[in-house]
Image (cartoon, rainbow, N blue to C red):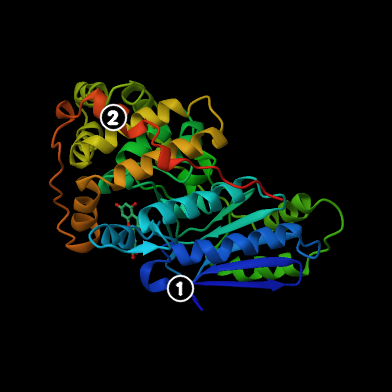
Amino acid sequence: MSEDVLLETRGPVGLVTLNRPQALNALNLGMCRAMDPQLRAWADDDRVRAVVIRGAGGRAFCAGGDVRAVAASLSGPATVGSEPLSRAFFRAEYALNHLIHHYPKPFIALVDGVCMGGGLGLSAHGAFRVVTERLMLSMPETAIGLFPDVGGGWFLPRFPGEMGTYLGLTGARCDAADARWLGYATHQIAASRLEDVLAALVDADWQGAAMDVVARVLAGSAADSGVSPLRARVEDIARCFSADRVEDILRALEAERSEWAEQTRATLMRMCPMSLKVTLRQLRMGRGGDYDAMVPVEYRLSQALTARADFREGIRAVLVDKDQKPRWSPASLDAVSEDAVDACFAQNPSDSFAPAAVR
Ligand code: QUE
């Protein structure tokens, strides 16, 4: 049996511990397949009043999906049953995100340390997102030829102004104060107090509405987050990131003639051109839409983008060789046609996605 995720109950609390500390708790298929039925069982178990998810090891909550394994499987015949890993993994991951989004009980993520990509999929959809002073939050997928998935098409457009566009395209990192200001985090609690908070949830008087009980316990330990560095950029970001074409965003950054804008432009120029165009369209599509409608779109995109050479090249440059010098193809934005972007969004009969309802 896999010990990559620990599942236990402590009195009225269902406790999930992501347990791959050597891989910063990156989420693999086995972990998704272990968590999914347990979360469904806890949803139906009257003795379980709330679910807590955390990461082991003290460095990370979750560094993302195990994209290294997905990329490795593409160069061989590795399948799960009859399905390629790229299909099975994203299906299981997005189904789990969907389950958490609609979870009928308080779902509390204790996000201490690194939280990227798939880590937001396990936290942003729950009712309570507790961060610590060690938070390093980011959606870095455009650096590896992917796009900000796990519901990024829903939660990024809901951040203030154009912050989600900025974060999704550049992969910029947020600290705890940023995360509170964005609305990702509901509470900040000192890392040294997380065990006490968990114990307080286990020992709480659970009479009355469970959401109120959790809110009361967390409020009792909450710390002040201080000022958000990102907030100071909100107007610059609104000015530069409101366009609907990536080329126009780059031009707006150029026109700023500031150090920040020049660095931001240089960051975007290193990202995968196809990823940037797909991401901007995804984020604009998600502006007014609901989450459930975005999930099948993201699933389609996951299949289209993992099938491209840019994904394997991004994994090579960022996670395998770590030379940080990906050779993208197409290599420039103007070489990415609208038709090629359209094709990533087009329905493919083998890519349909219908997540199961909770209960
Ligand atoms: C973009 C990503 C990921 C990433 C880096 C990116 C990602 C992911 C990891 C990662 C990091 C450290 C590990 C690990 C995985 O990095 O999804 O196993 O030890 O999981 O630029 O999307």
Residue in the picture at 50% in, 49% down: 94
Disc 2, disc 1: CB below 8 Å? no
Relative to 101, is 262 above or below? Answer: above
Quadrant containing ligand 1 reads bottom left
Left or right of residue 76: residue 285: right
Q: Residue 341, labelled with which disc?
A: 2
Q: Residue 42: give its label.
A: none
Q: Which percent across, then down, holds residue 132?
A: 51, 58
User: What is the C-alpha distance between the residues marked 2 and 1?
Assistant: 40 Å
Q: Position of residue 55 (x, y in %)?
A: 50, 66
- Residue at 36% x, 28% y is 281
Residue that lies at the very extreme toward the bottom in this rendered image: 1
Neighbours of disc 2 within 10 Å: few (<14), some (14-19), many (20+): some
- Residue 230: which quarter of the image? top left
For label 1, count other residues whose C-alpha is less than 10 Å away and answer few (under 14), some (14-19) or many (20+): some
The residue at which mark 1 appears reads as: 57
The relative height of residue 263 versus residue 358 in the rendered view (above or below) is above
Position of 200 compared to 190: left or right? right
Of 200 and 15, nearer the camera is 15
Q: Amino acid at mark 1?
A: Gly
